[in-house]
Amino acid sequence: MKPPPFEYLAPRSLDEAVAALAEHGDEAKAMAGGQSLVPLLAFRLARPSVIVDLNGVGGLDGARLEGDTLELGALARQRDVERLPGLRQRCPMVVEAIEQIGHVAIRNRGTVGGSLAHADPAAEWTALALALDAECDLVGPSGARTVAAREFLVSTFMTALEPDELLTGLRLRVPNGRTGSCFTELARRHGDFALAGVGALLTLDEGGAVAEARIALIGVAETAVRSPSAERCLVGHPPTAEVVAEAAAAVADDLDPNSDIHASADYRRHVSGVLLRRALETAAARARGGTDGAA
């Protein structure tokens, strides 16, 4: 299929890109890697009259891990983040999640900001943003603002972005010390959208009890969600098999999945508990090893 006709704009600066969006409003659509937008255009599920291609805008493609912060530009390619030196050892959850995104060819073009702004409820970056307390930098005609990921992700394909705003980057908090993390998901085939997915991060205190727990899930609600019920089960207790099982059972209280042709709501709830147990077991083993490295 072919996309509907549109005007193509290729701004060379952030100011030009924002001005183009401000001029055309709801008729315009920003394009980063195009791995989500182009298929929508081809199936005519999206019909913008103007495409604003951001790939000529400089300064939006950085990716670096410094201290406790993973700083990513909106145009950072997913494959570049996946291969960022030291990231797998420091926070394997991030790399494991990226490895589930499509295939290498898709990750070579797909961008962090494009995925997050698209806000698919099964997108791995939405879970990472929630689990790692991301701060999202937005810019528009009125200036720049910073929005927490929990406020940025509004609903299915809906974010806090105004029609004339762009996501320029984000910062994710990567704890140090006795911290372990893991991301796992279930899909019909590798590269397919997840039926359910879980990112888990545990930080242990000196006595081996969980000092901090962060759990984020995809594919089980209108957007990615944290699980406060499961997190409460973990904090203050050693991550024993019994405690992990209790947290895995509690996660269902925080989920509101839909039934569709791929899976029923009950199946997604069940799978989420199974995935969470596996993710917590791996995260706990990594935390006990003293660093957030691969098991």
Image (spheres, rainbow, N blue to C red):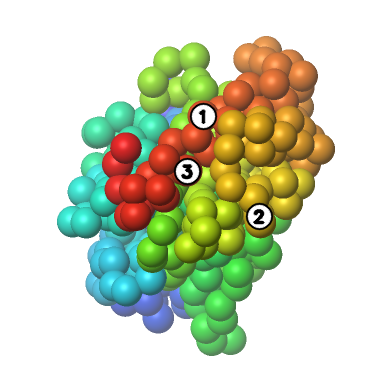
In the rendered view, tell whether residue 7 sits above or below residue 262.
below
Residue occupying the far front of the picture? 207
Q: Answer with left or right where residue 257 lies relative to residue 217.
A: right
Which kind of residue does numbered mark 3 sit on?
Ala
Viewer-side residue, 37 vs 284: 284
Query: Dot 1: few (<14), some (14–19), or many (≥20) neighbours within 10 Å?
Result: some
- Which mark sits nearer the N-terminus, 1 or 3? 1
Q: Check disc 1 and report its element: helix, strand or loop.
A: helix
Mark 1 and mark 3 residues within 8 Å of each other at the beta carbon? no
Which kind of residue does numbered mark 2 sit on?
Val
Residue occupying the far bottom of the picture? 143
Q: Quadrant of residue 23?
A: bottom right
Mark 1–mark 3 distance (CA, rounded to whole Å): 10 Å
**Which residue is label 1 attached to?**
278
Viewer-side residue, 90 vs 29: 90
Q: Residue at x 52, y 59 (%)?
A: 207
Q: Check disc 2 and report its element: helix, strand or loop.
A: loop
Q: Position of residue 242 (x, y in %)?
A: 66, 32
Which kind of residue does numbered mark 1 sit on?
Arg
- Which mark sits nearer the N-terminus, 3 or 2? 2
**Which residue is label 2 attached to?**
235
Mark 2–mark 1 distance (CA, rounded to whole Å): 18 Å
**Which residue is label 3 attached to?**
284
Q: Answer with left or right where residue 11 lies relative to residue 44.
A: left
Q: Residue at x 43, y 15 (%)?
A: 189
Viewer-side residue, 264 vs 278: 278
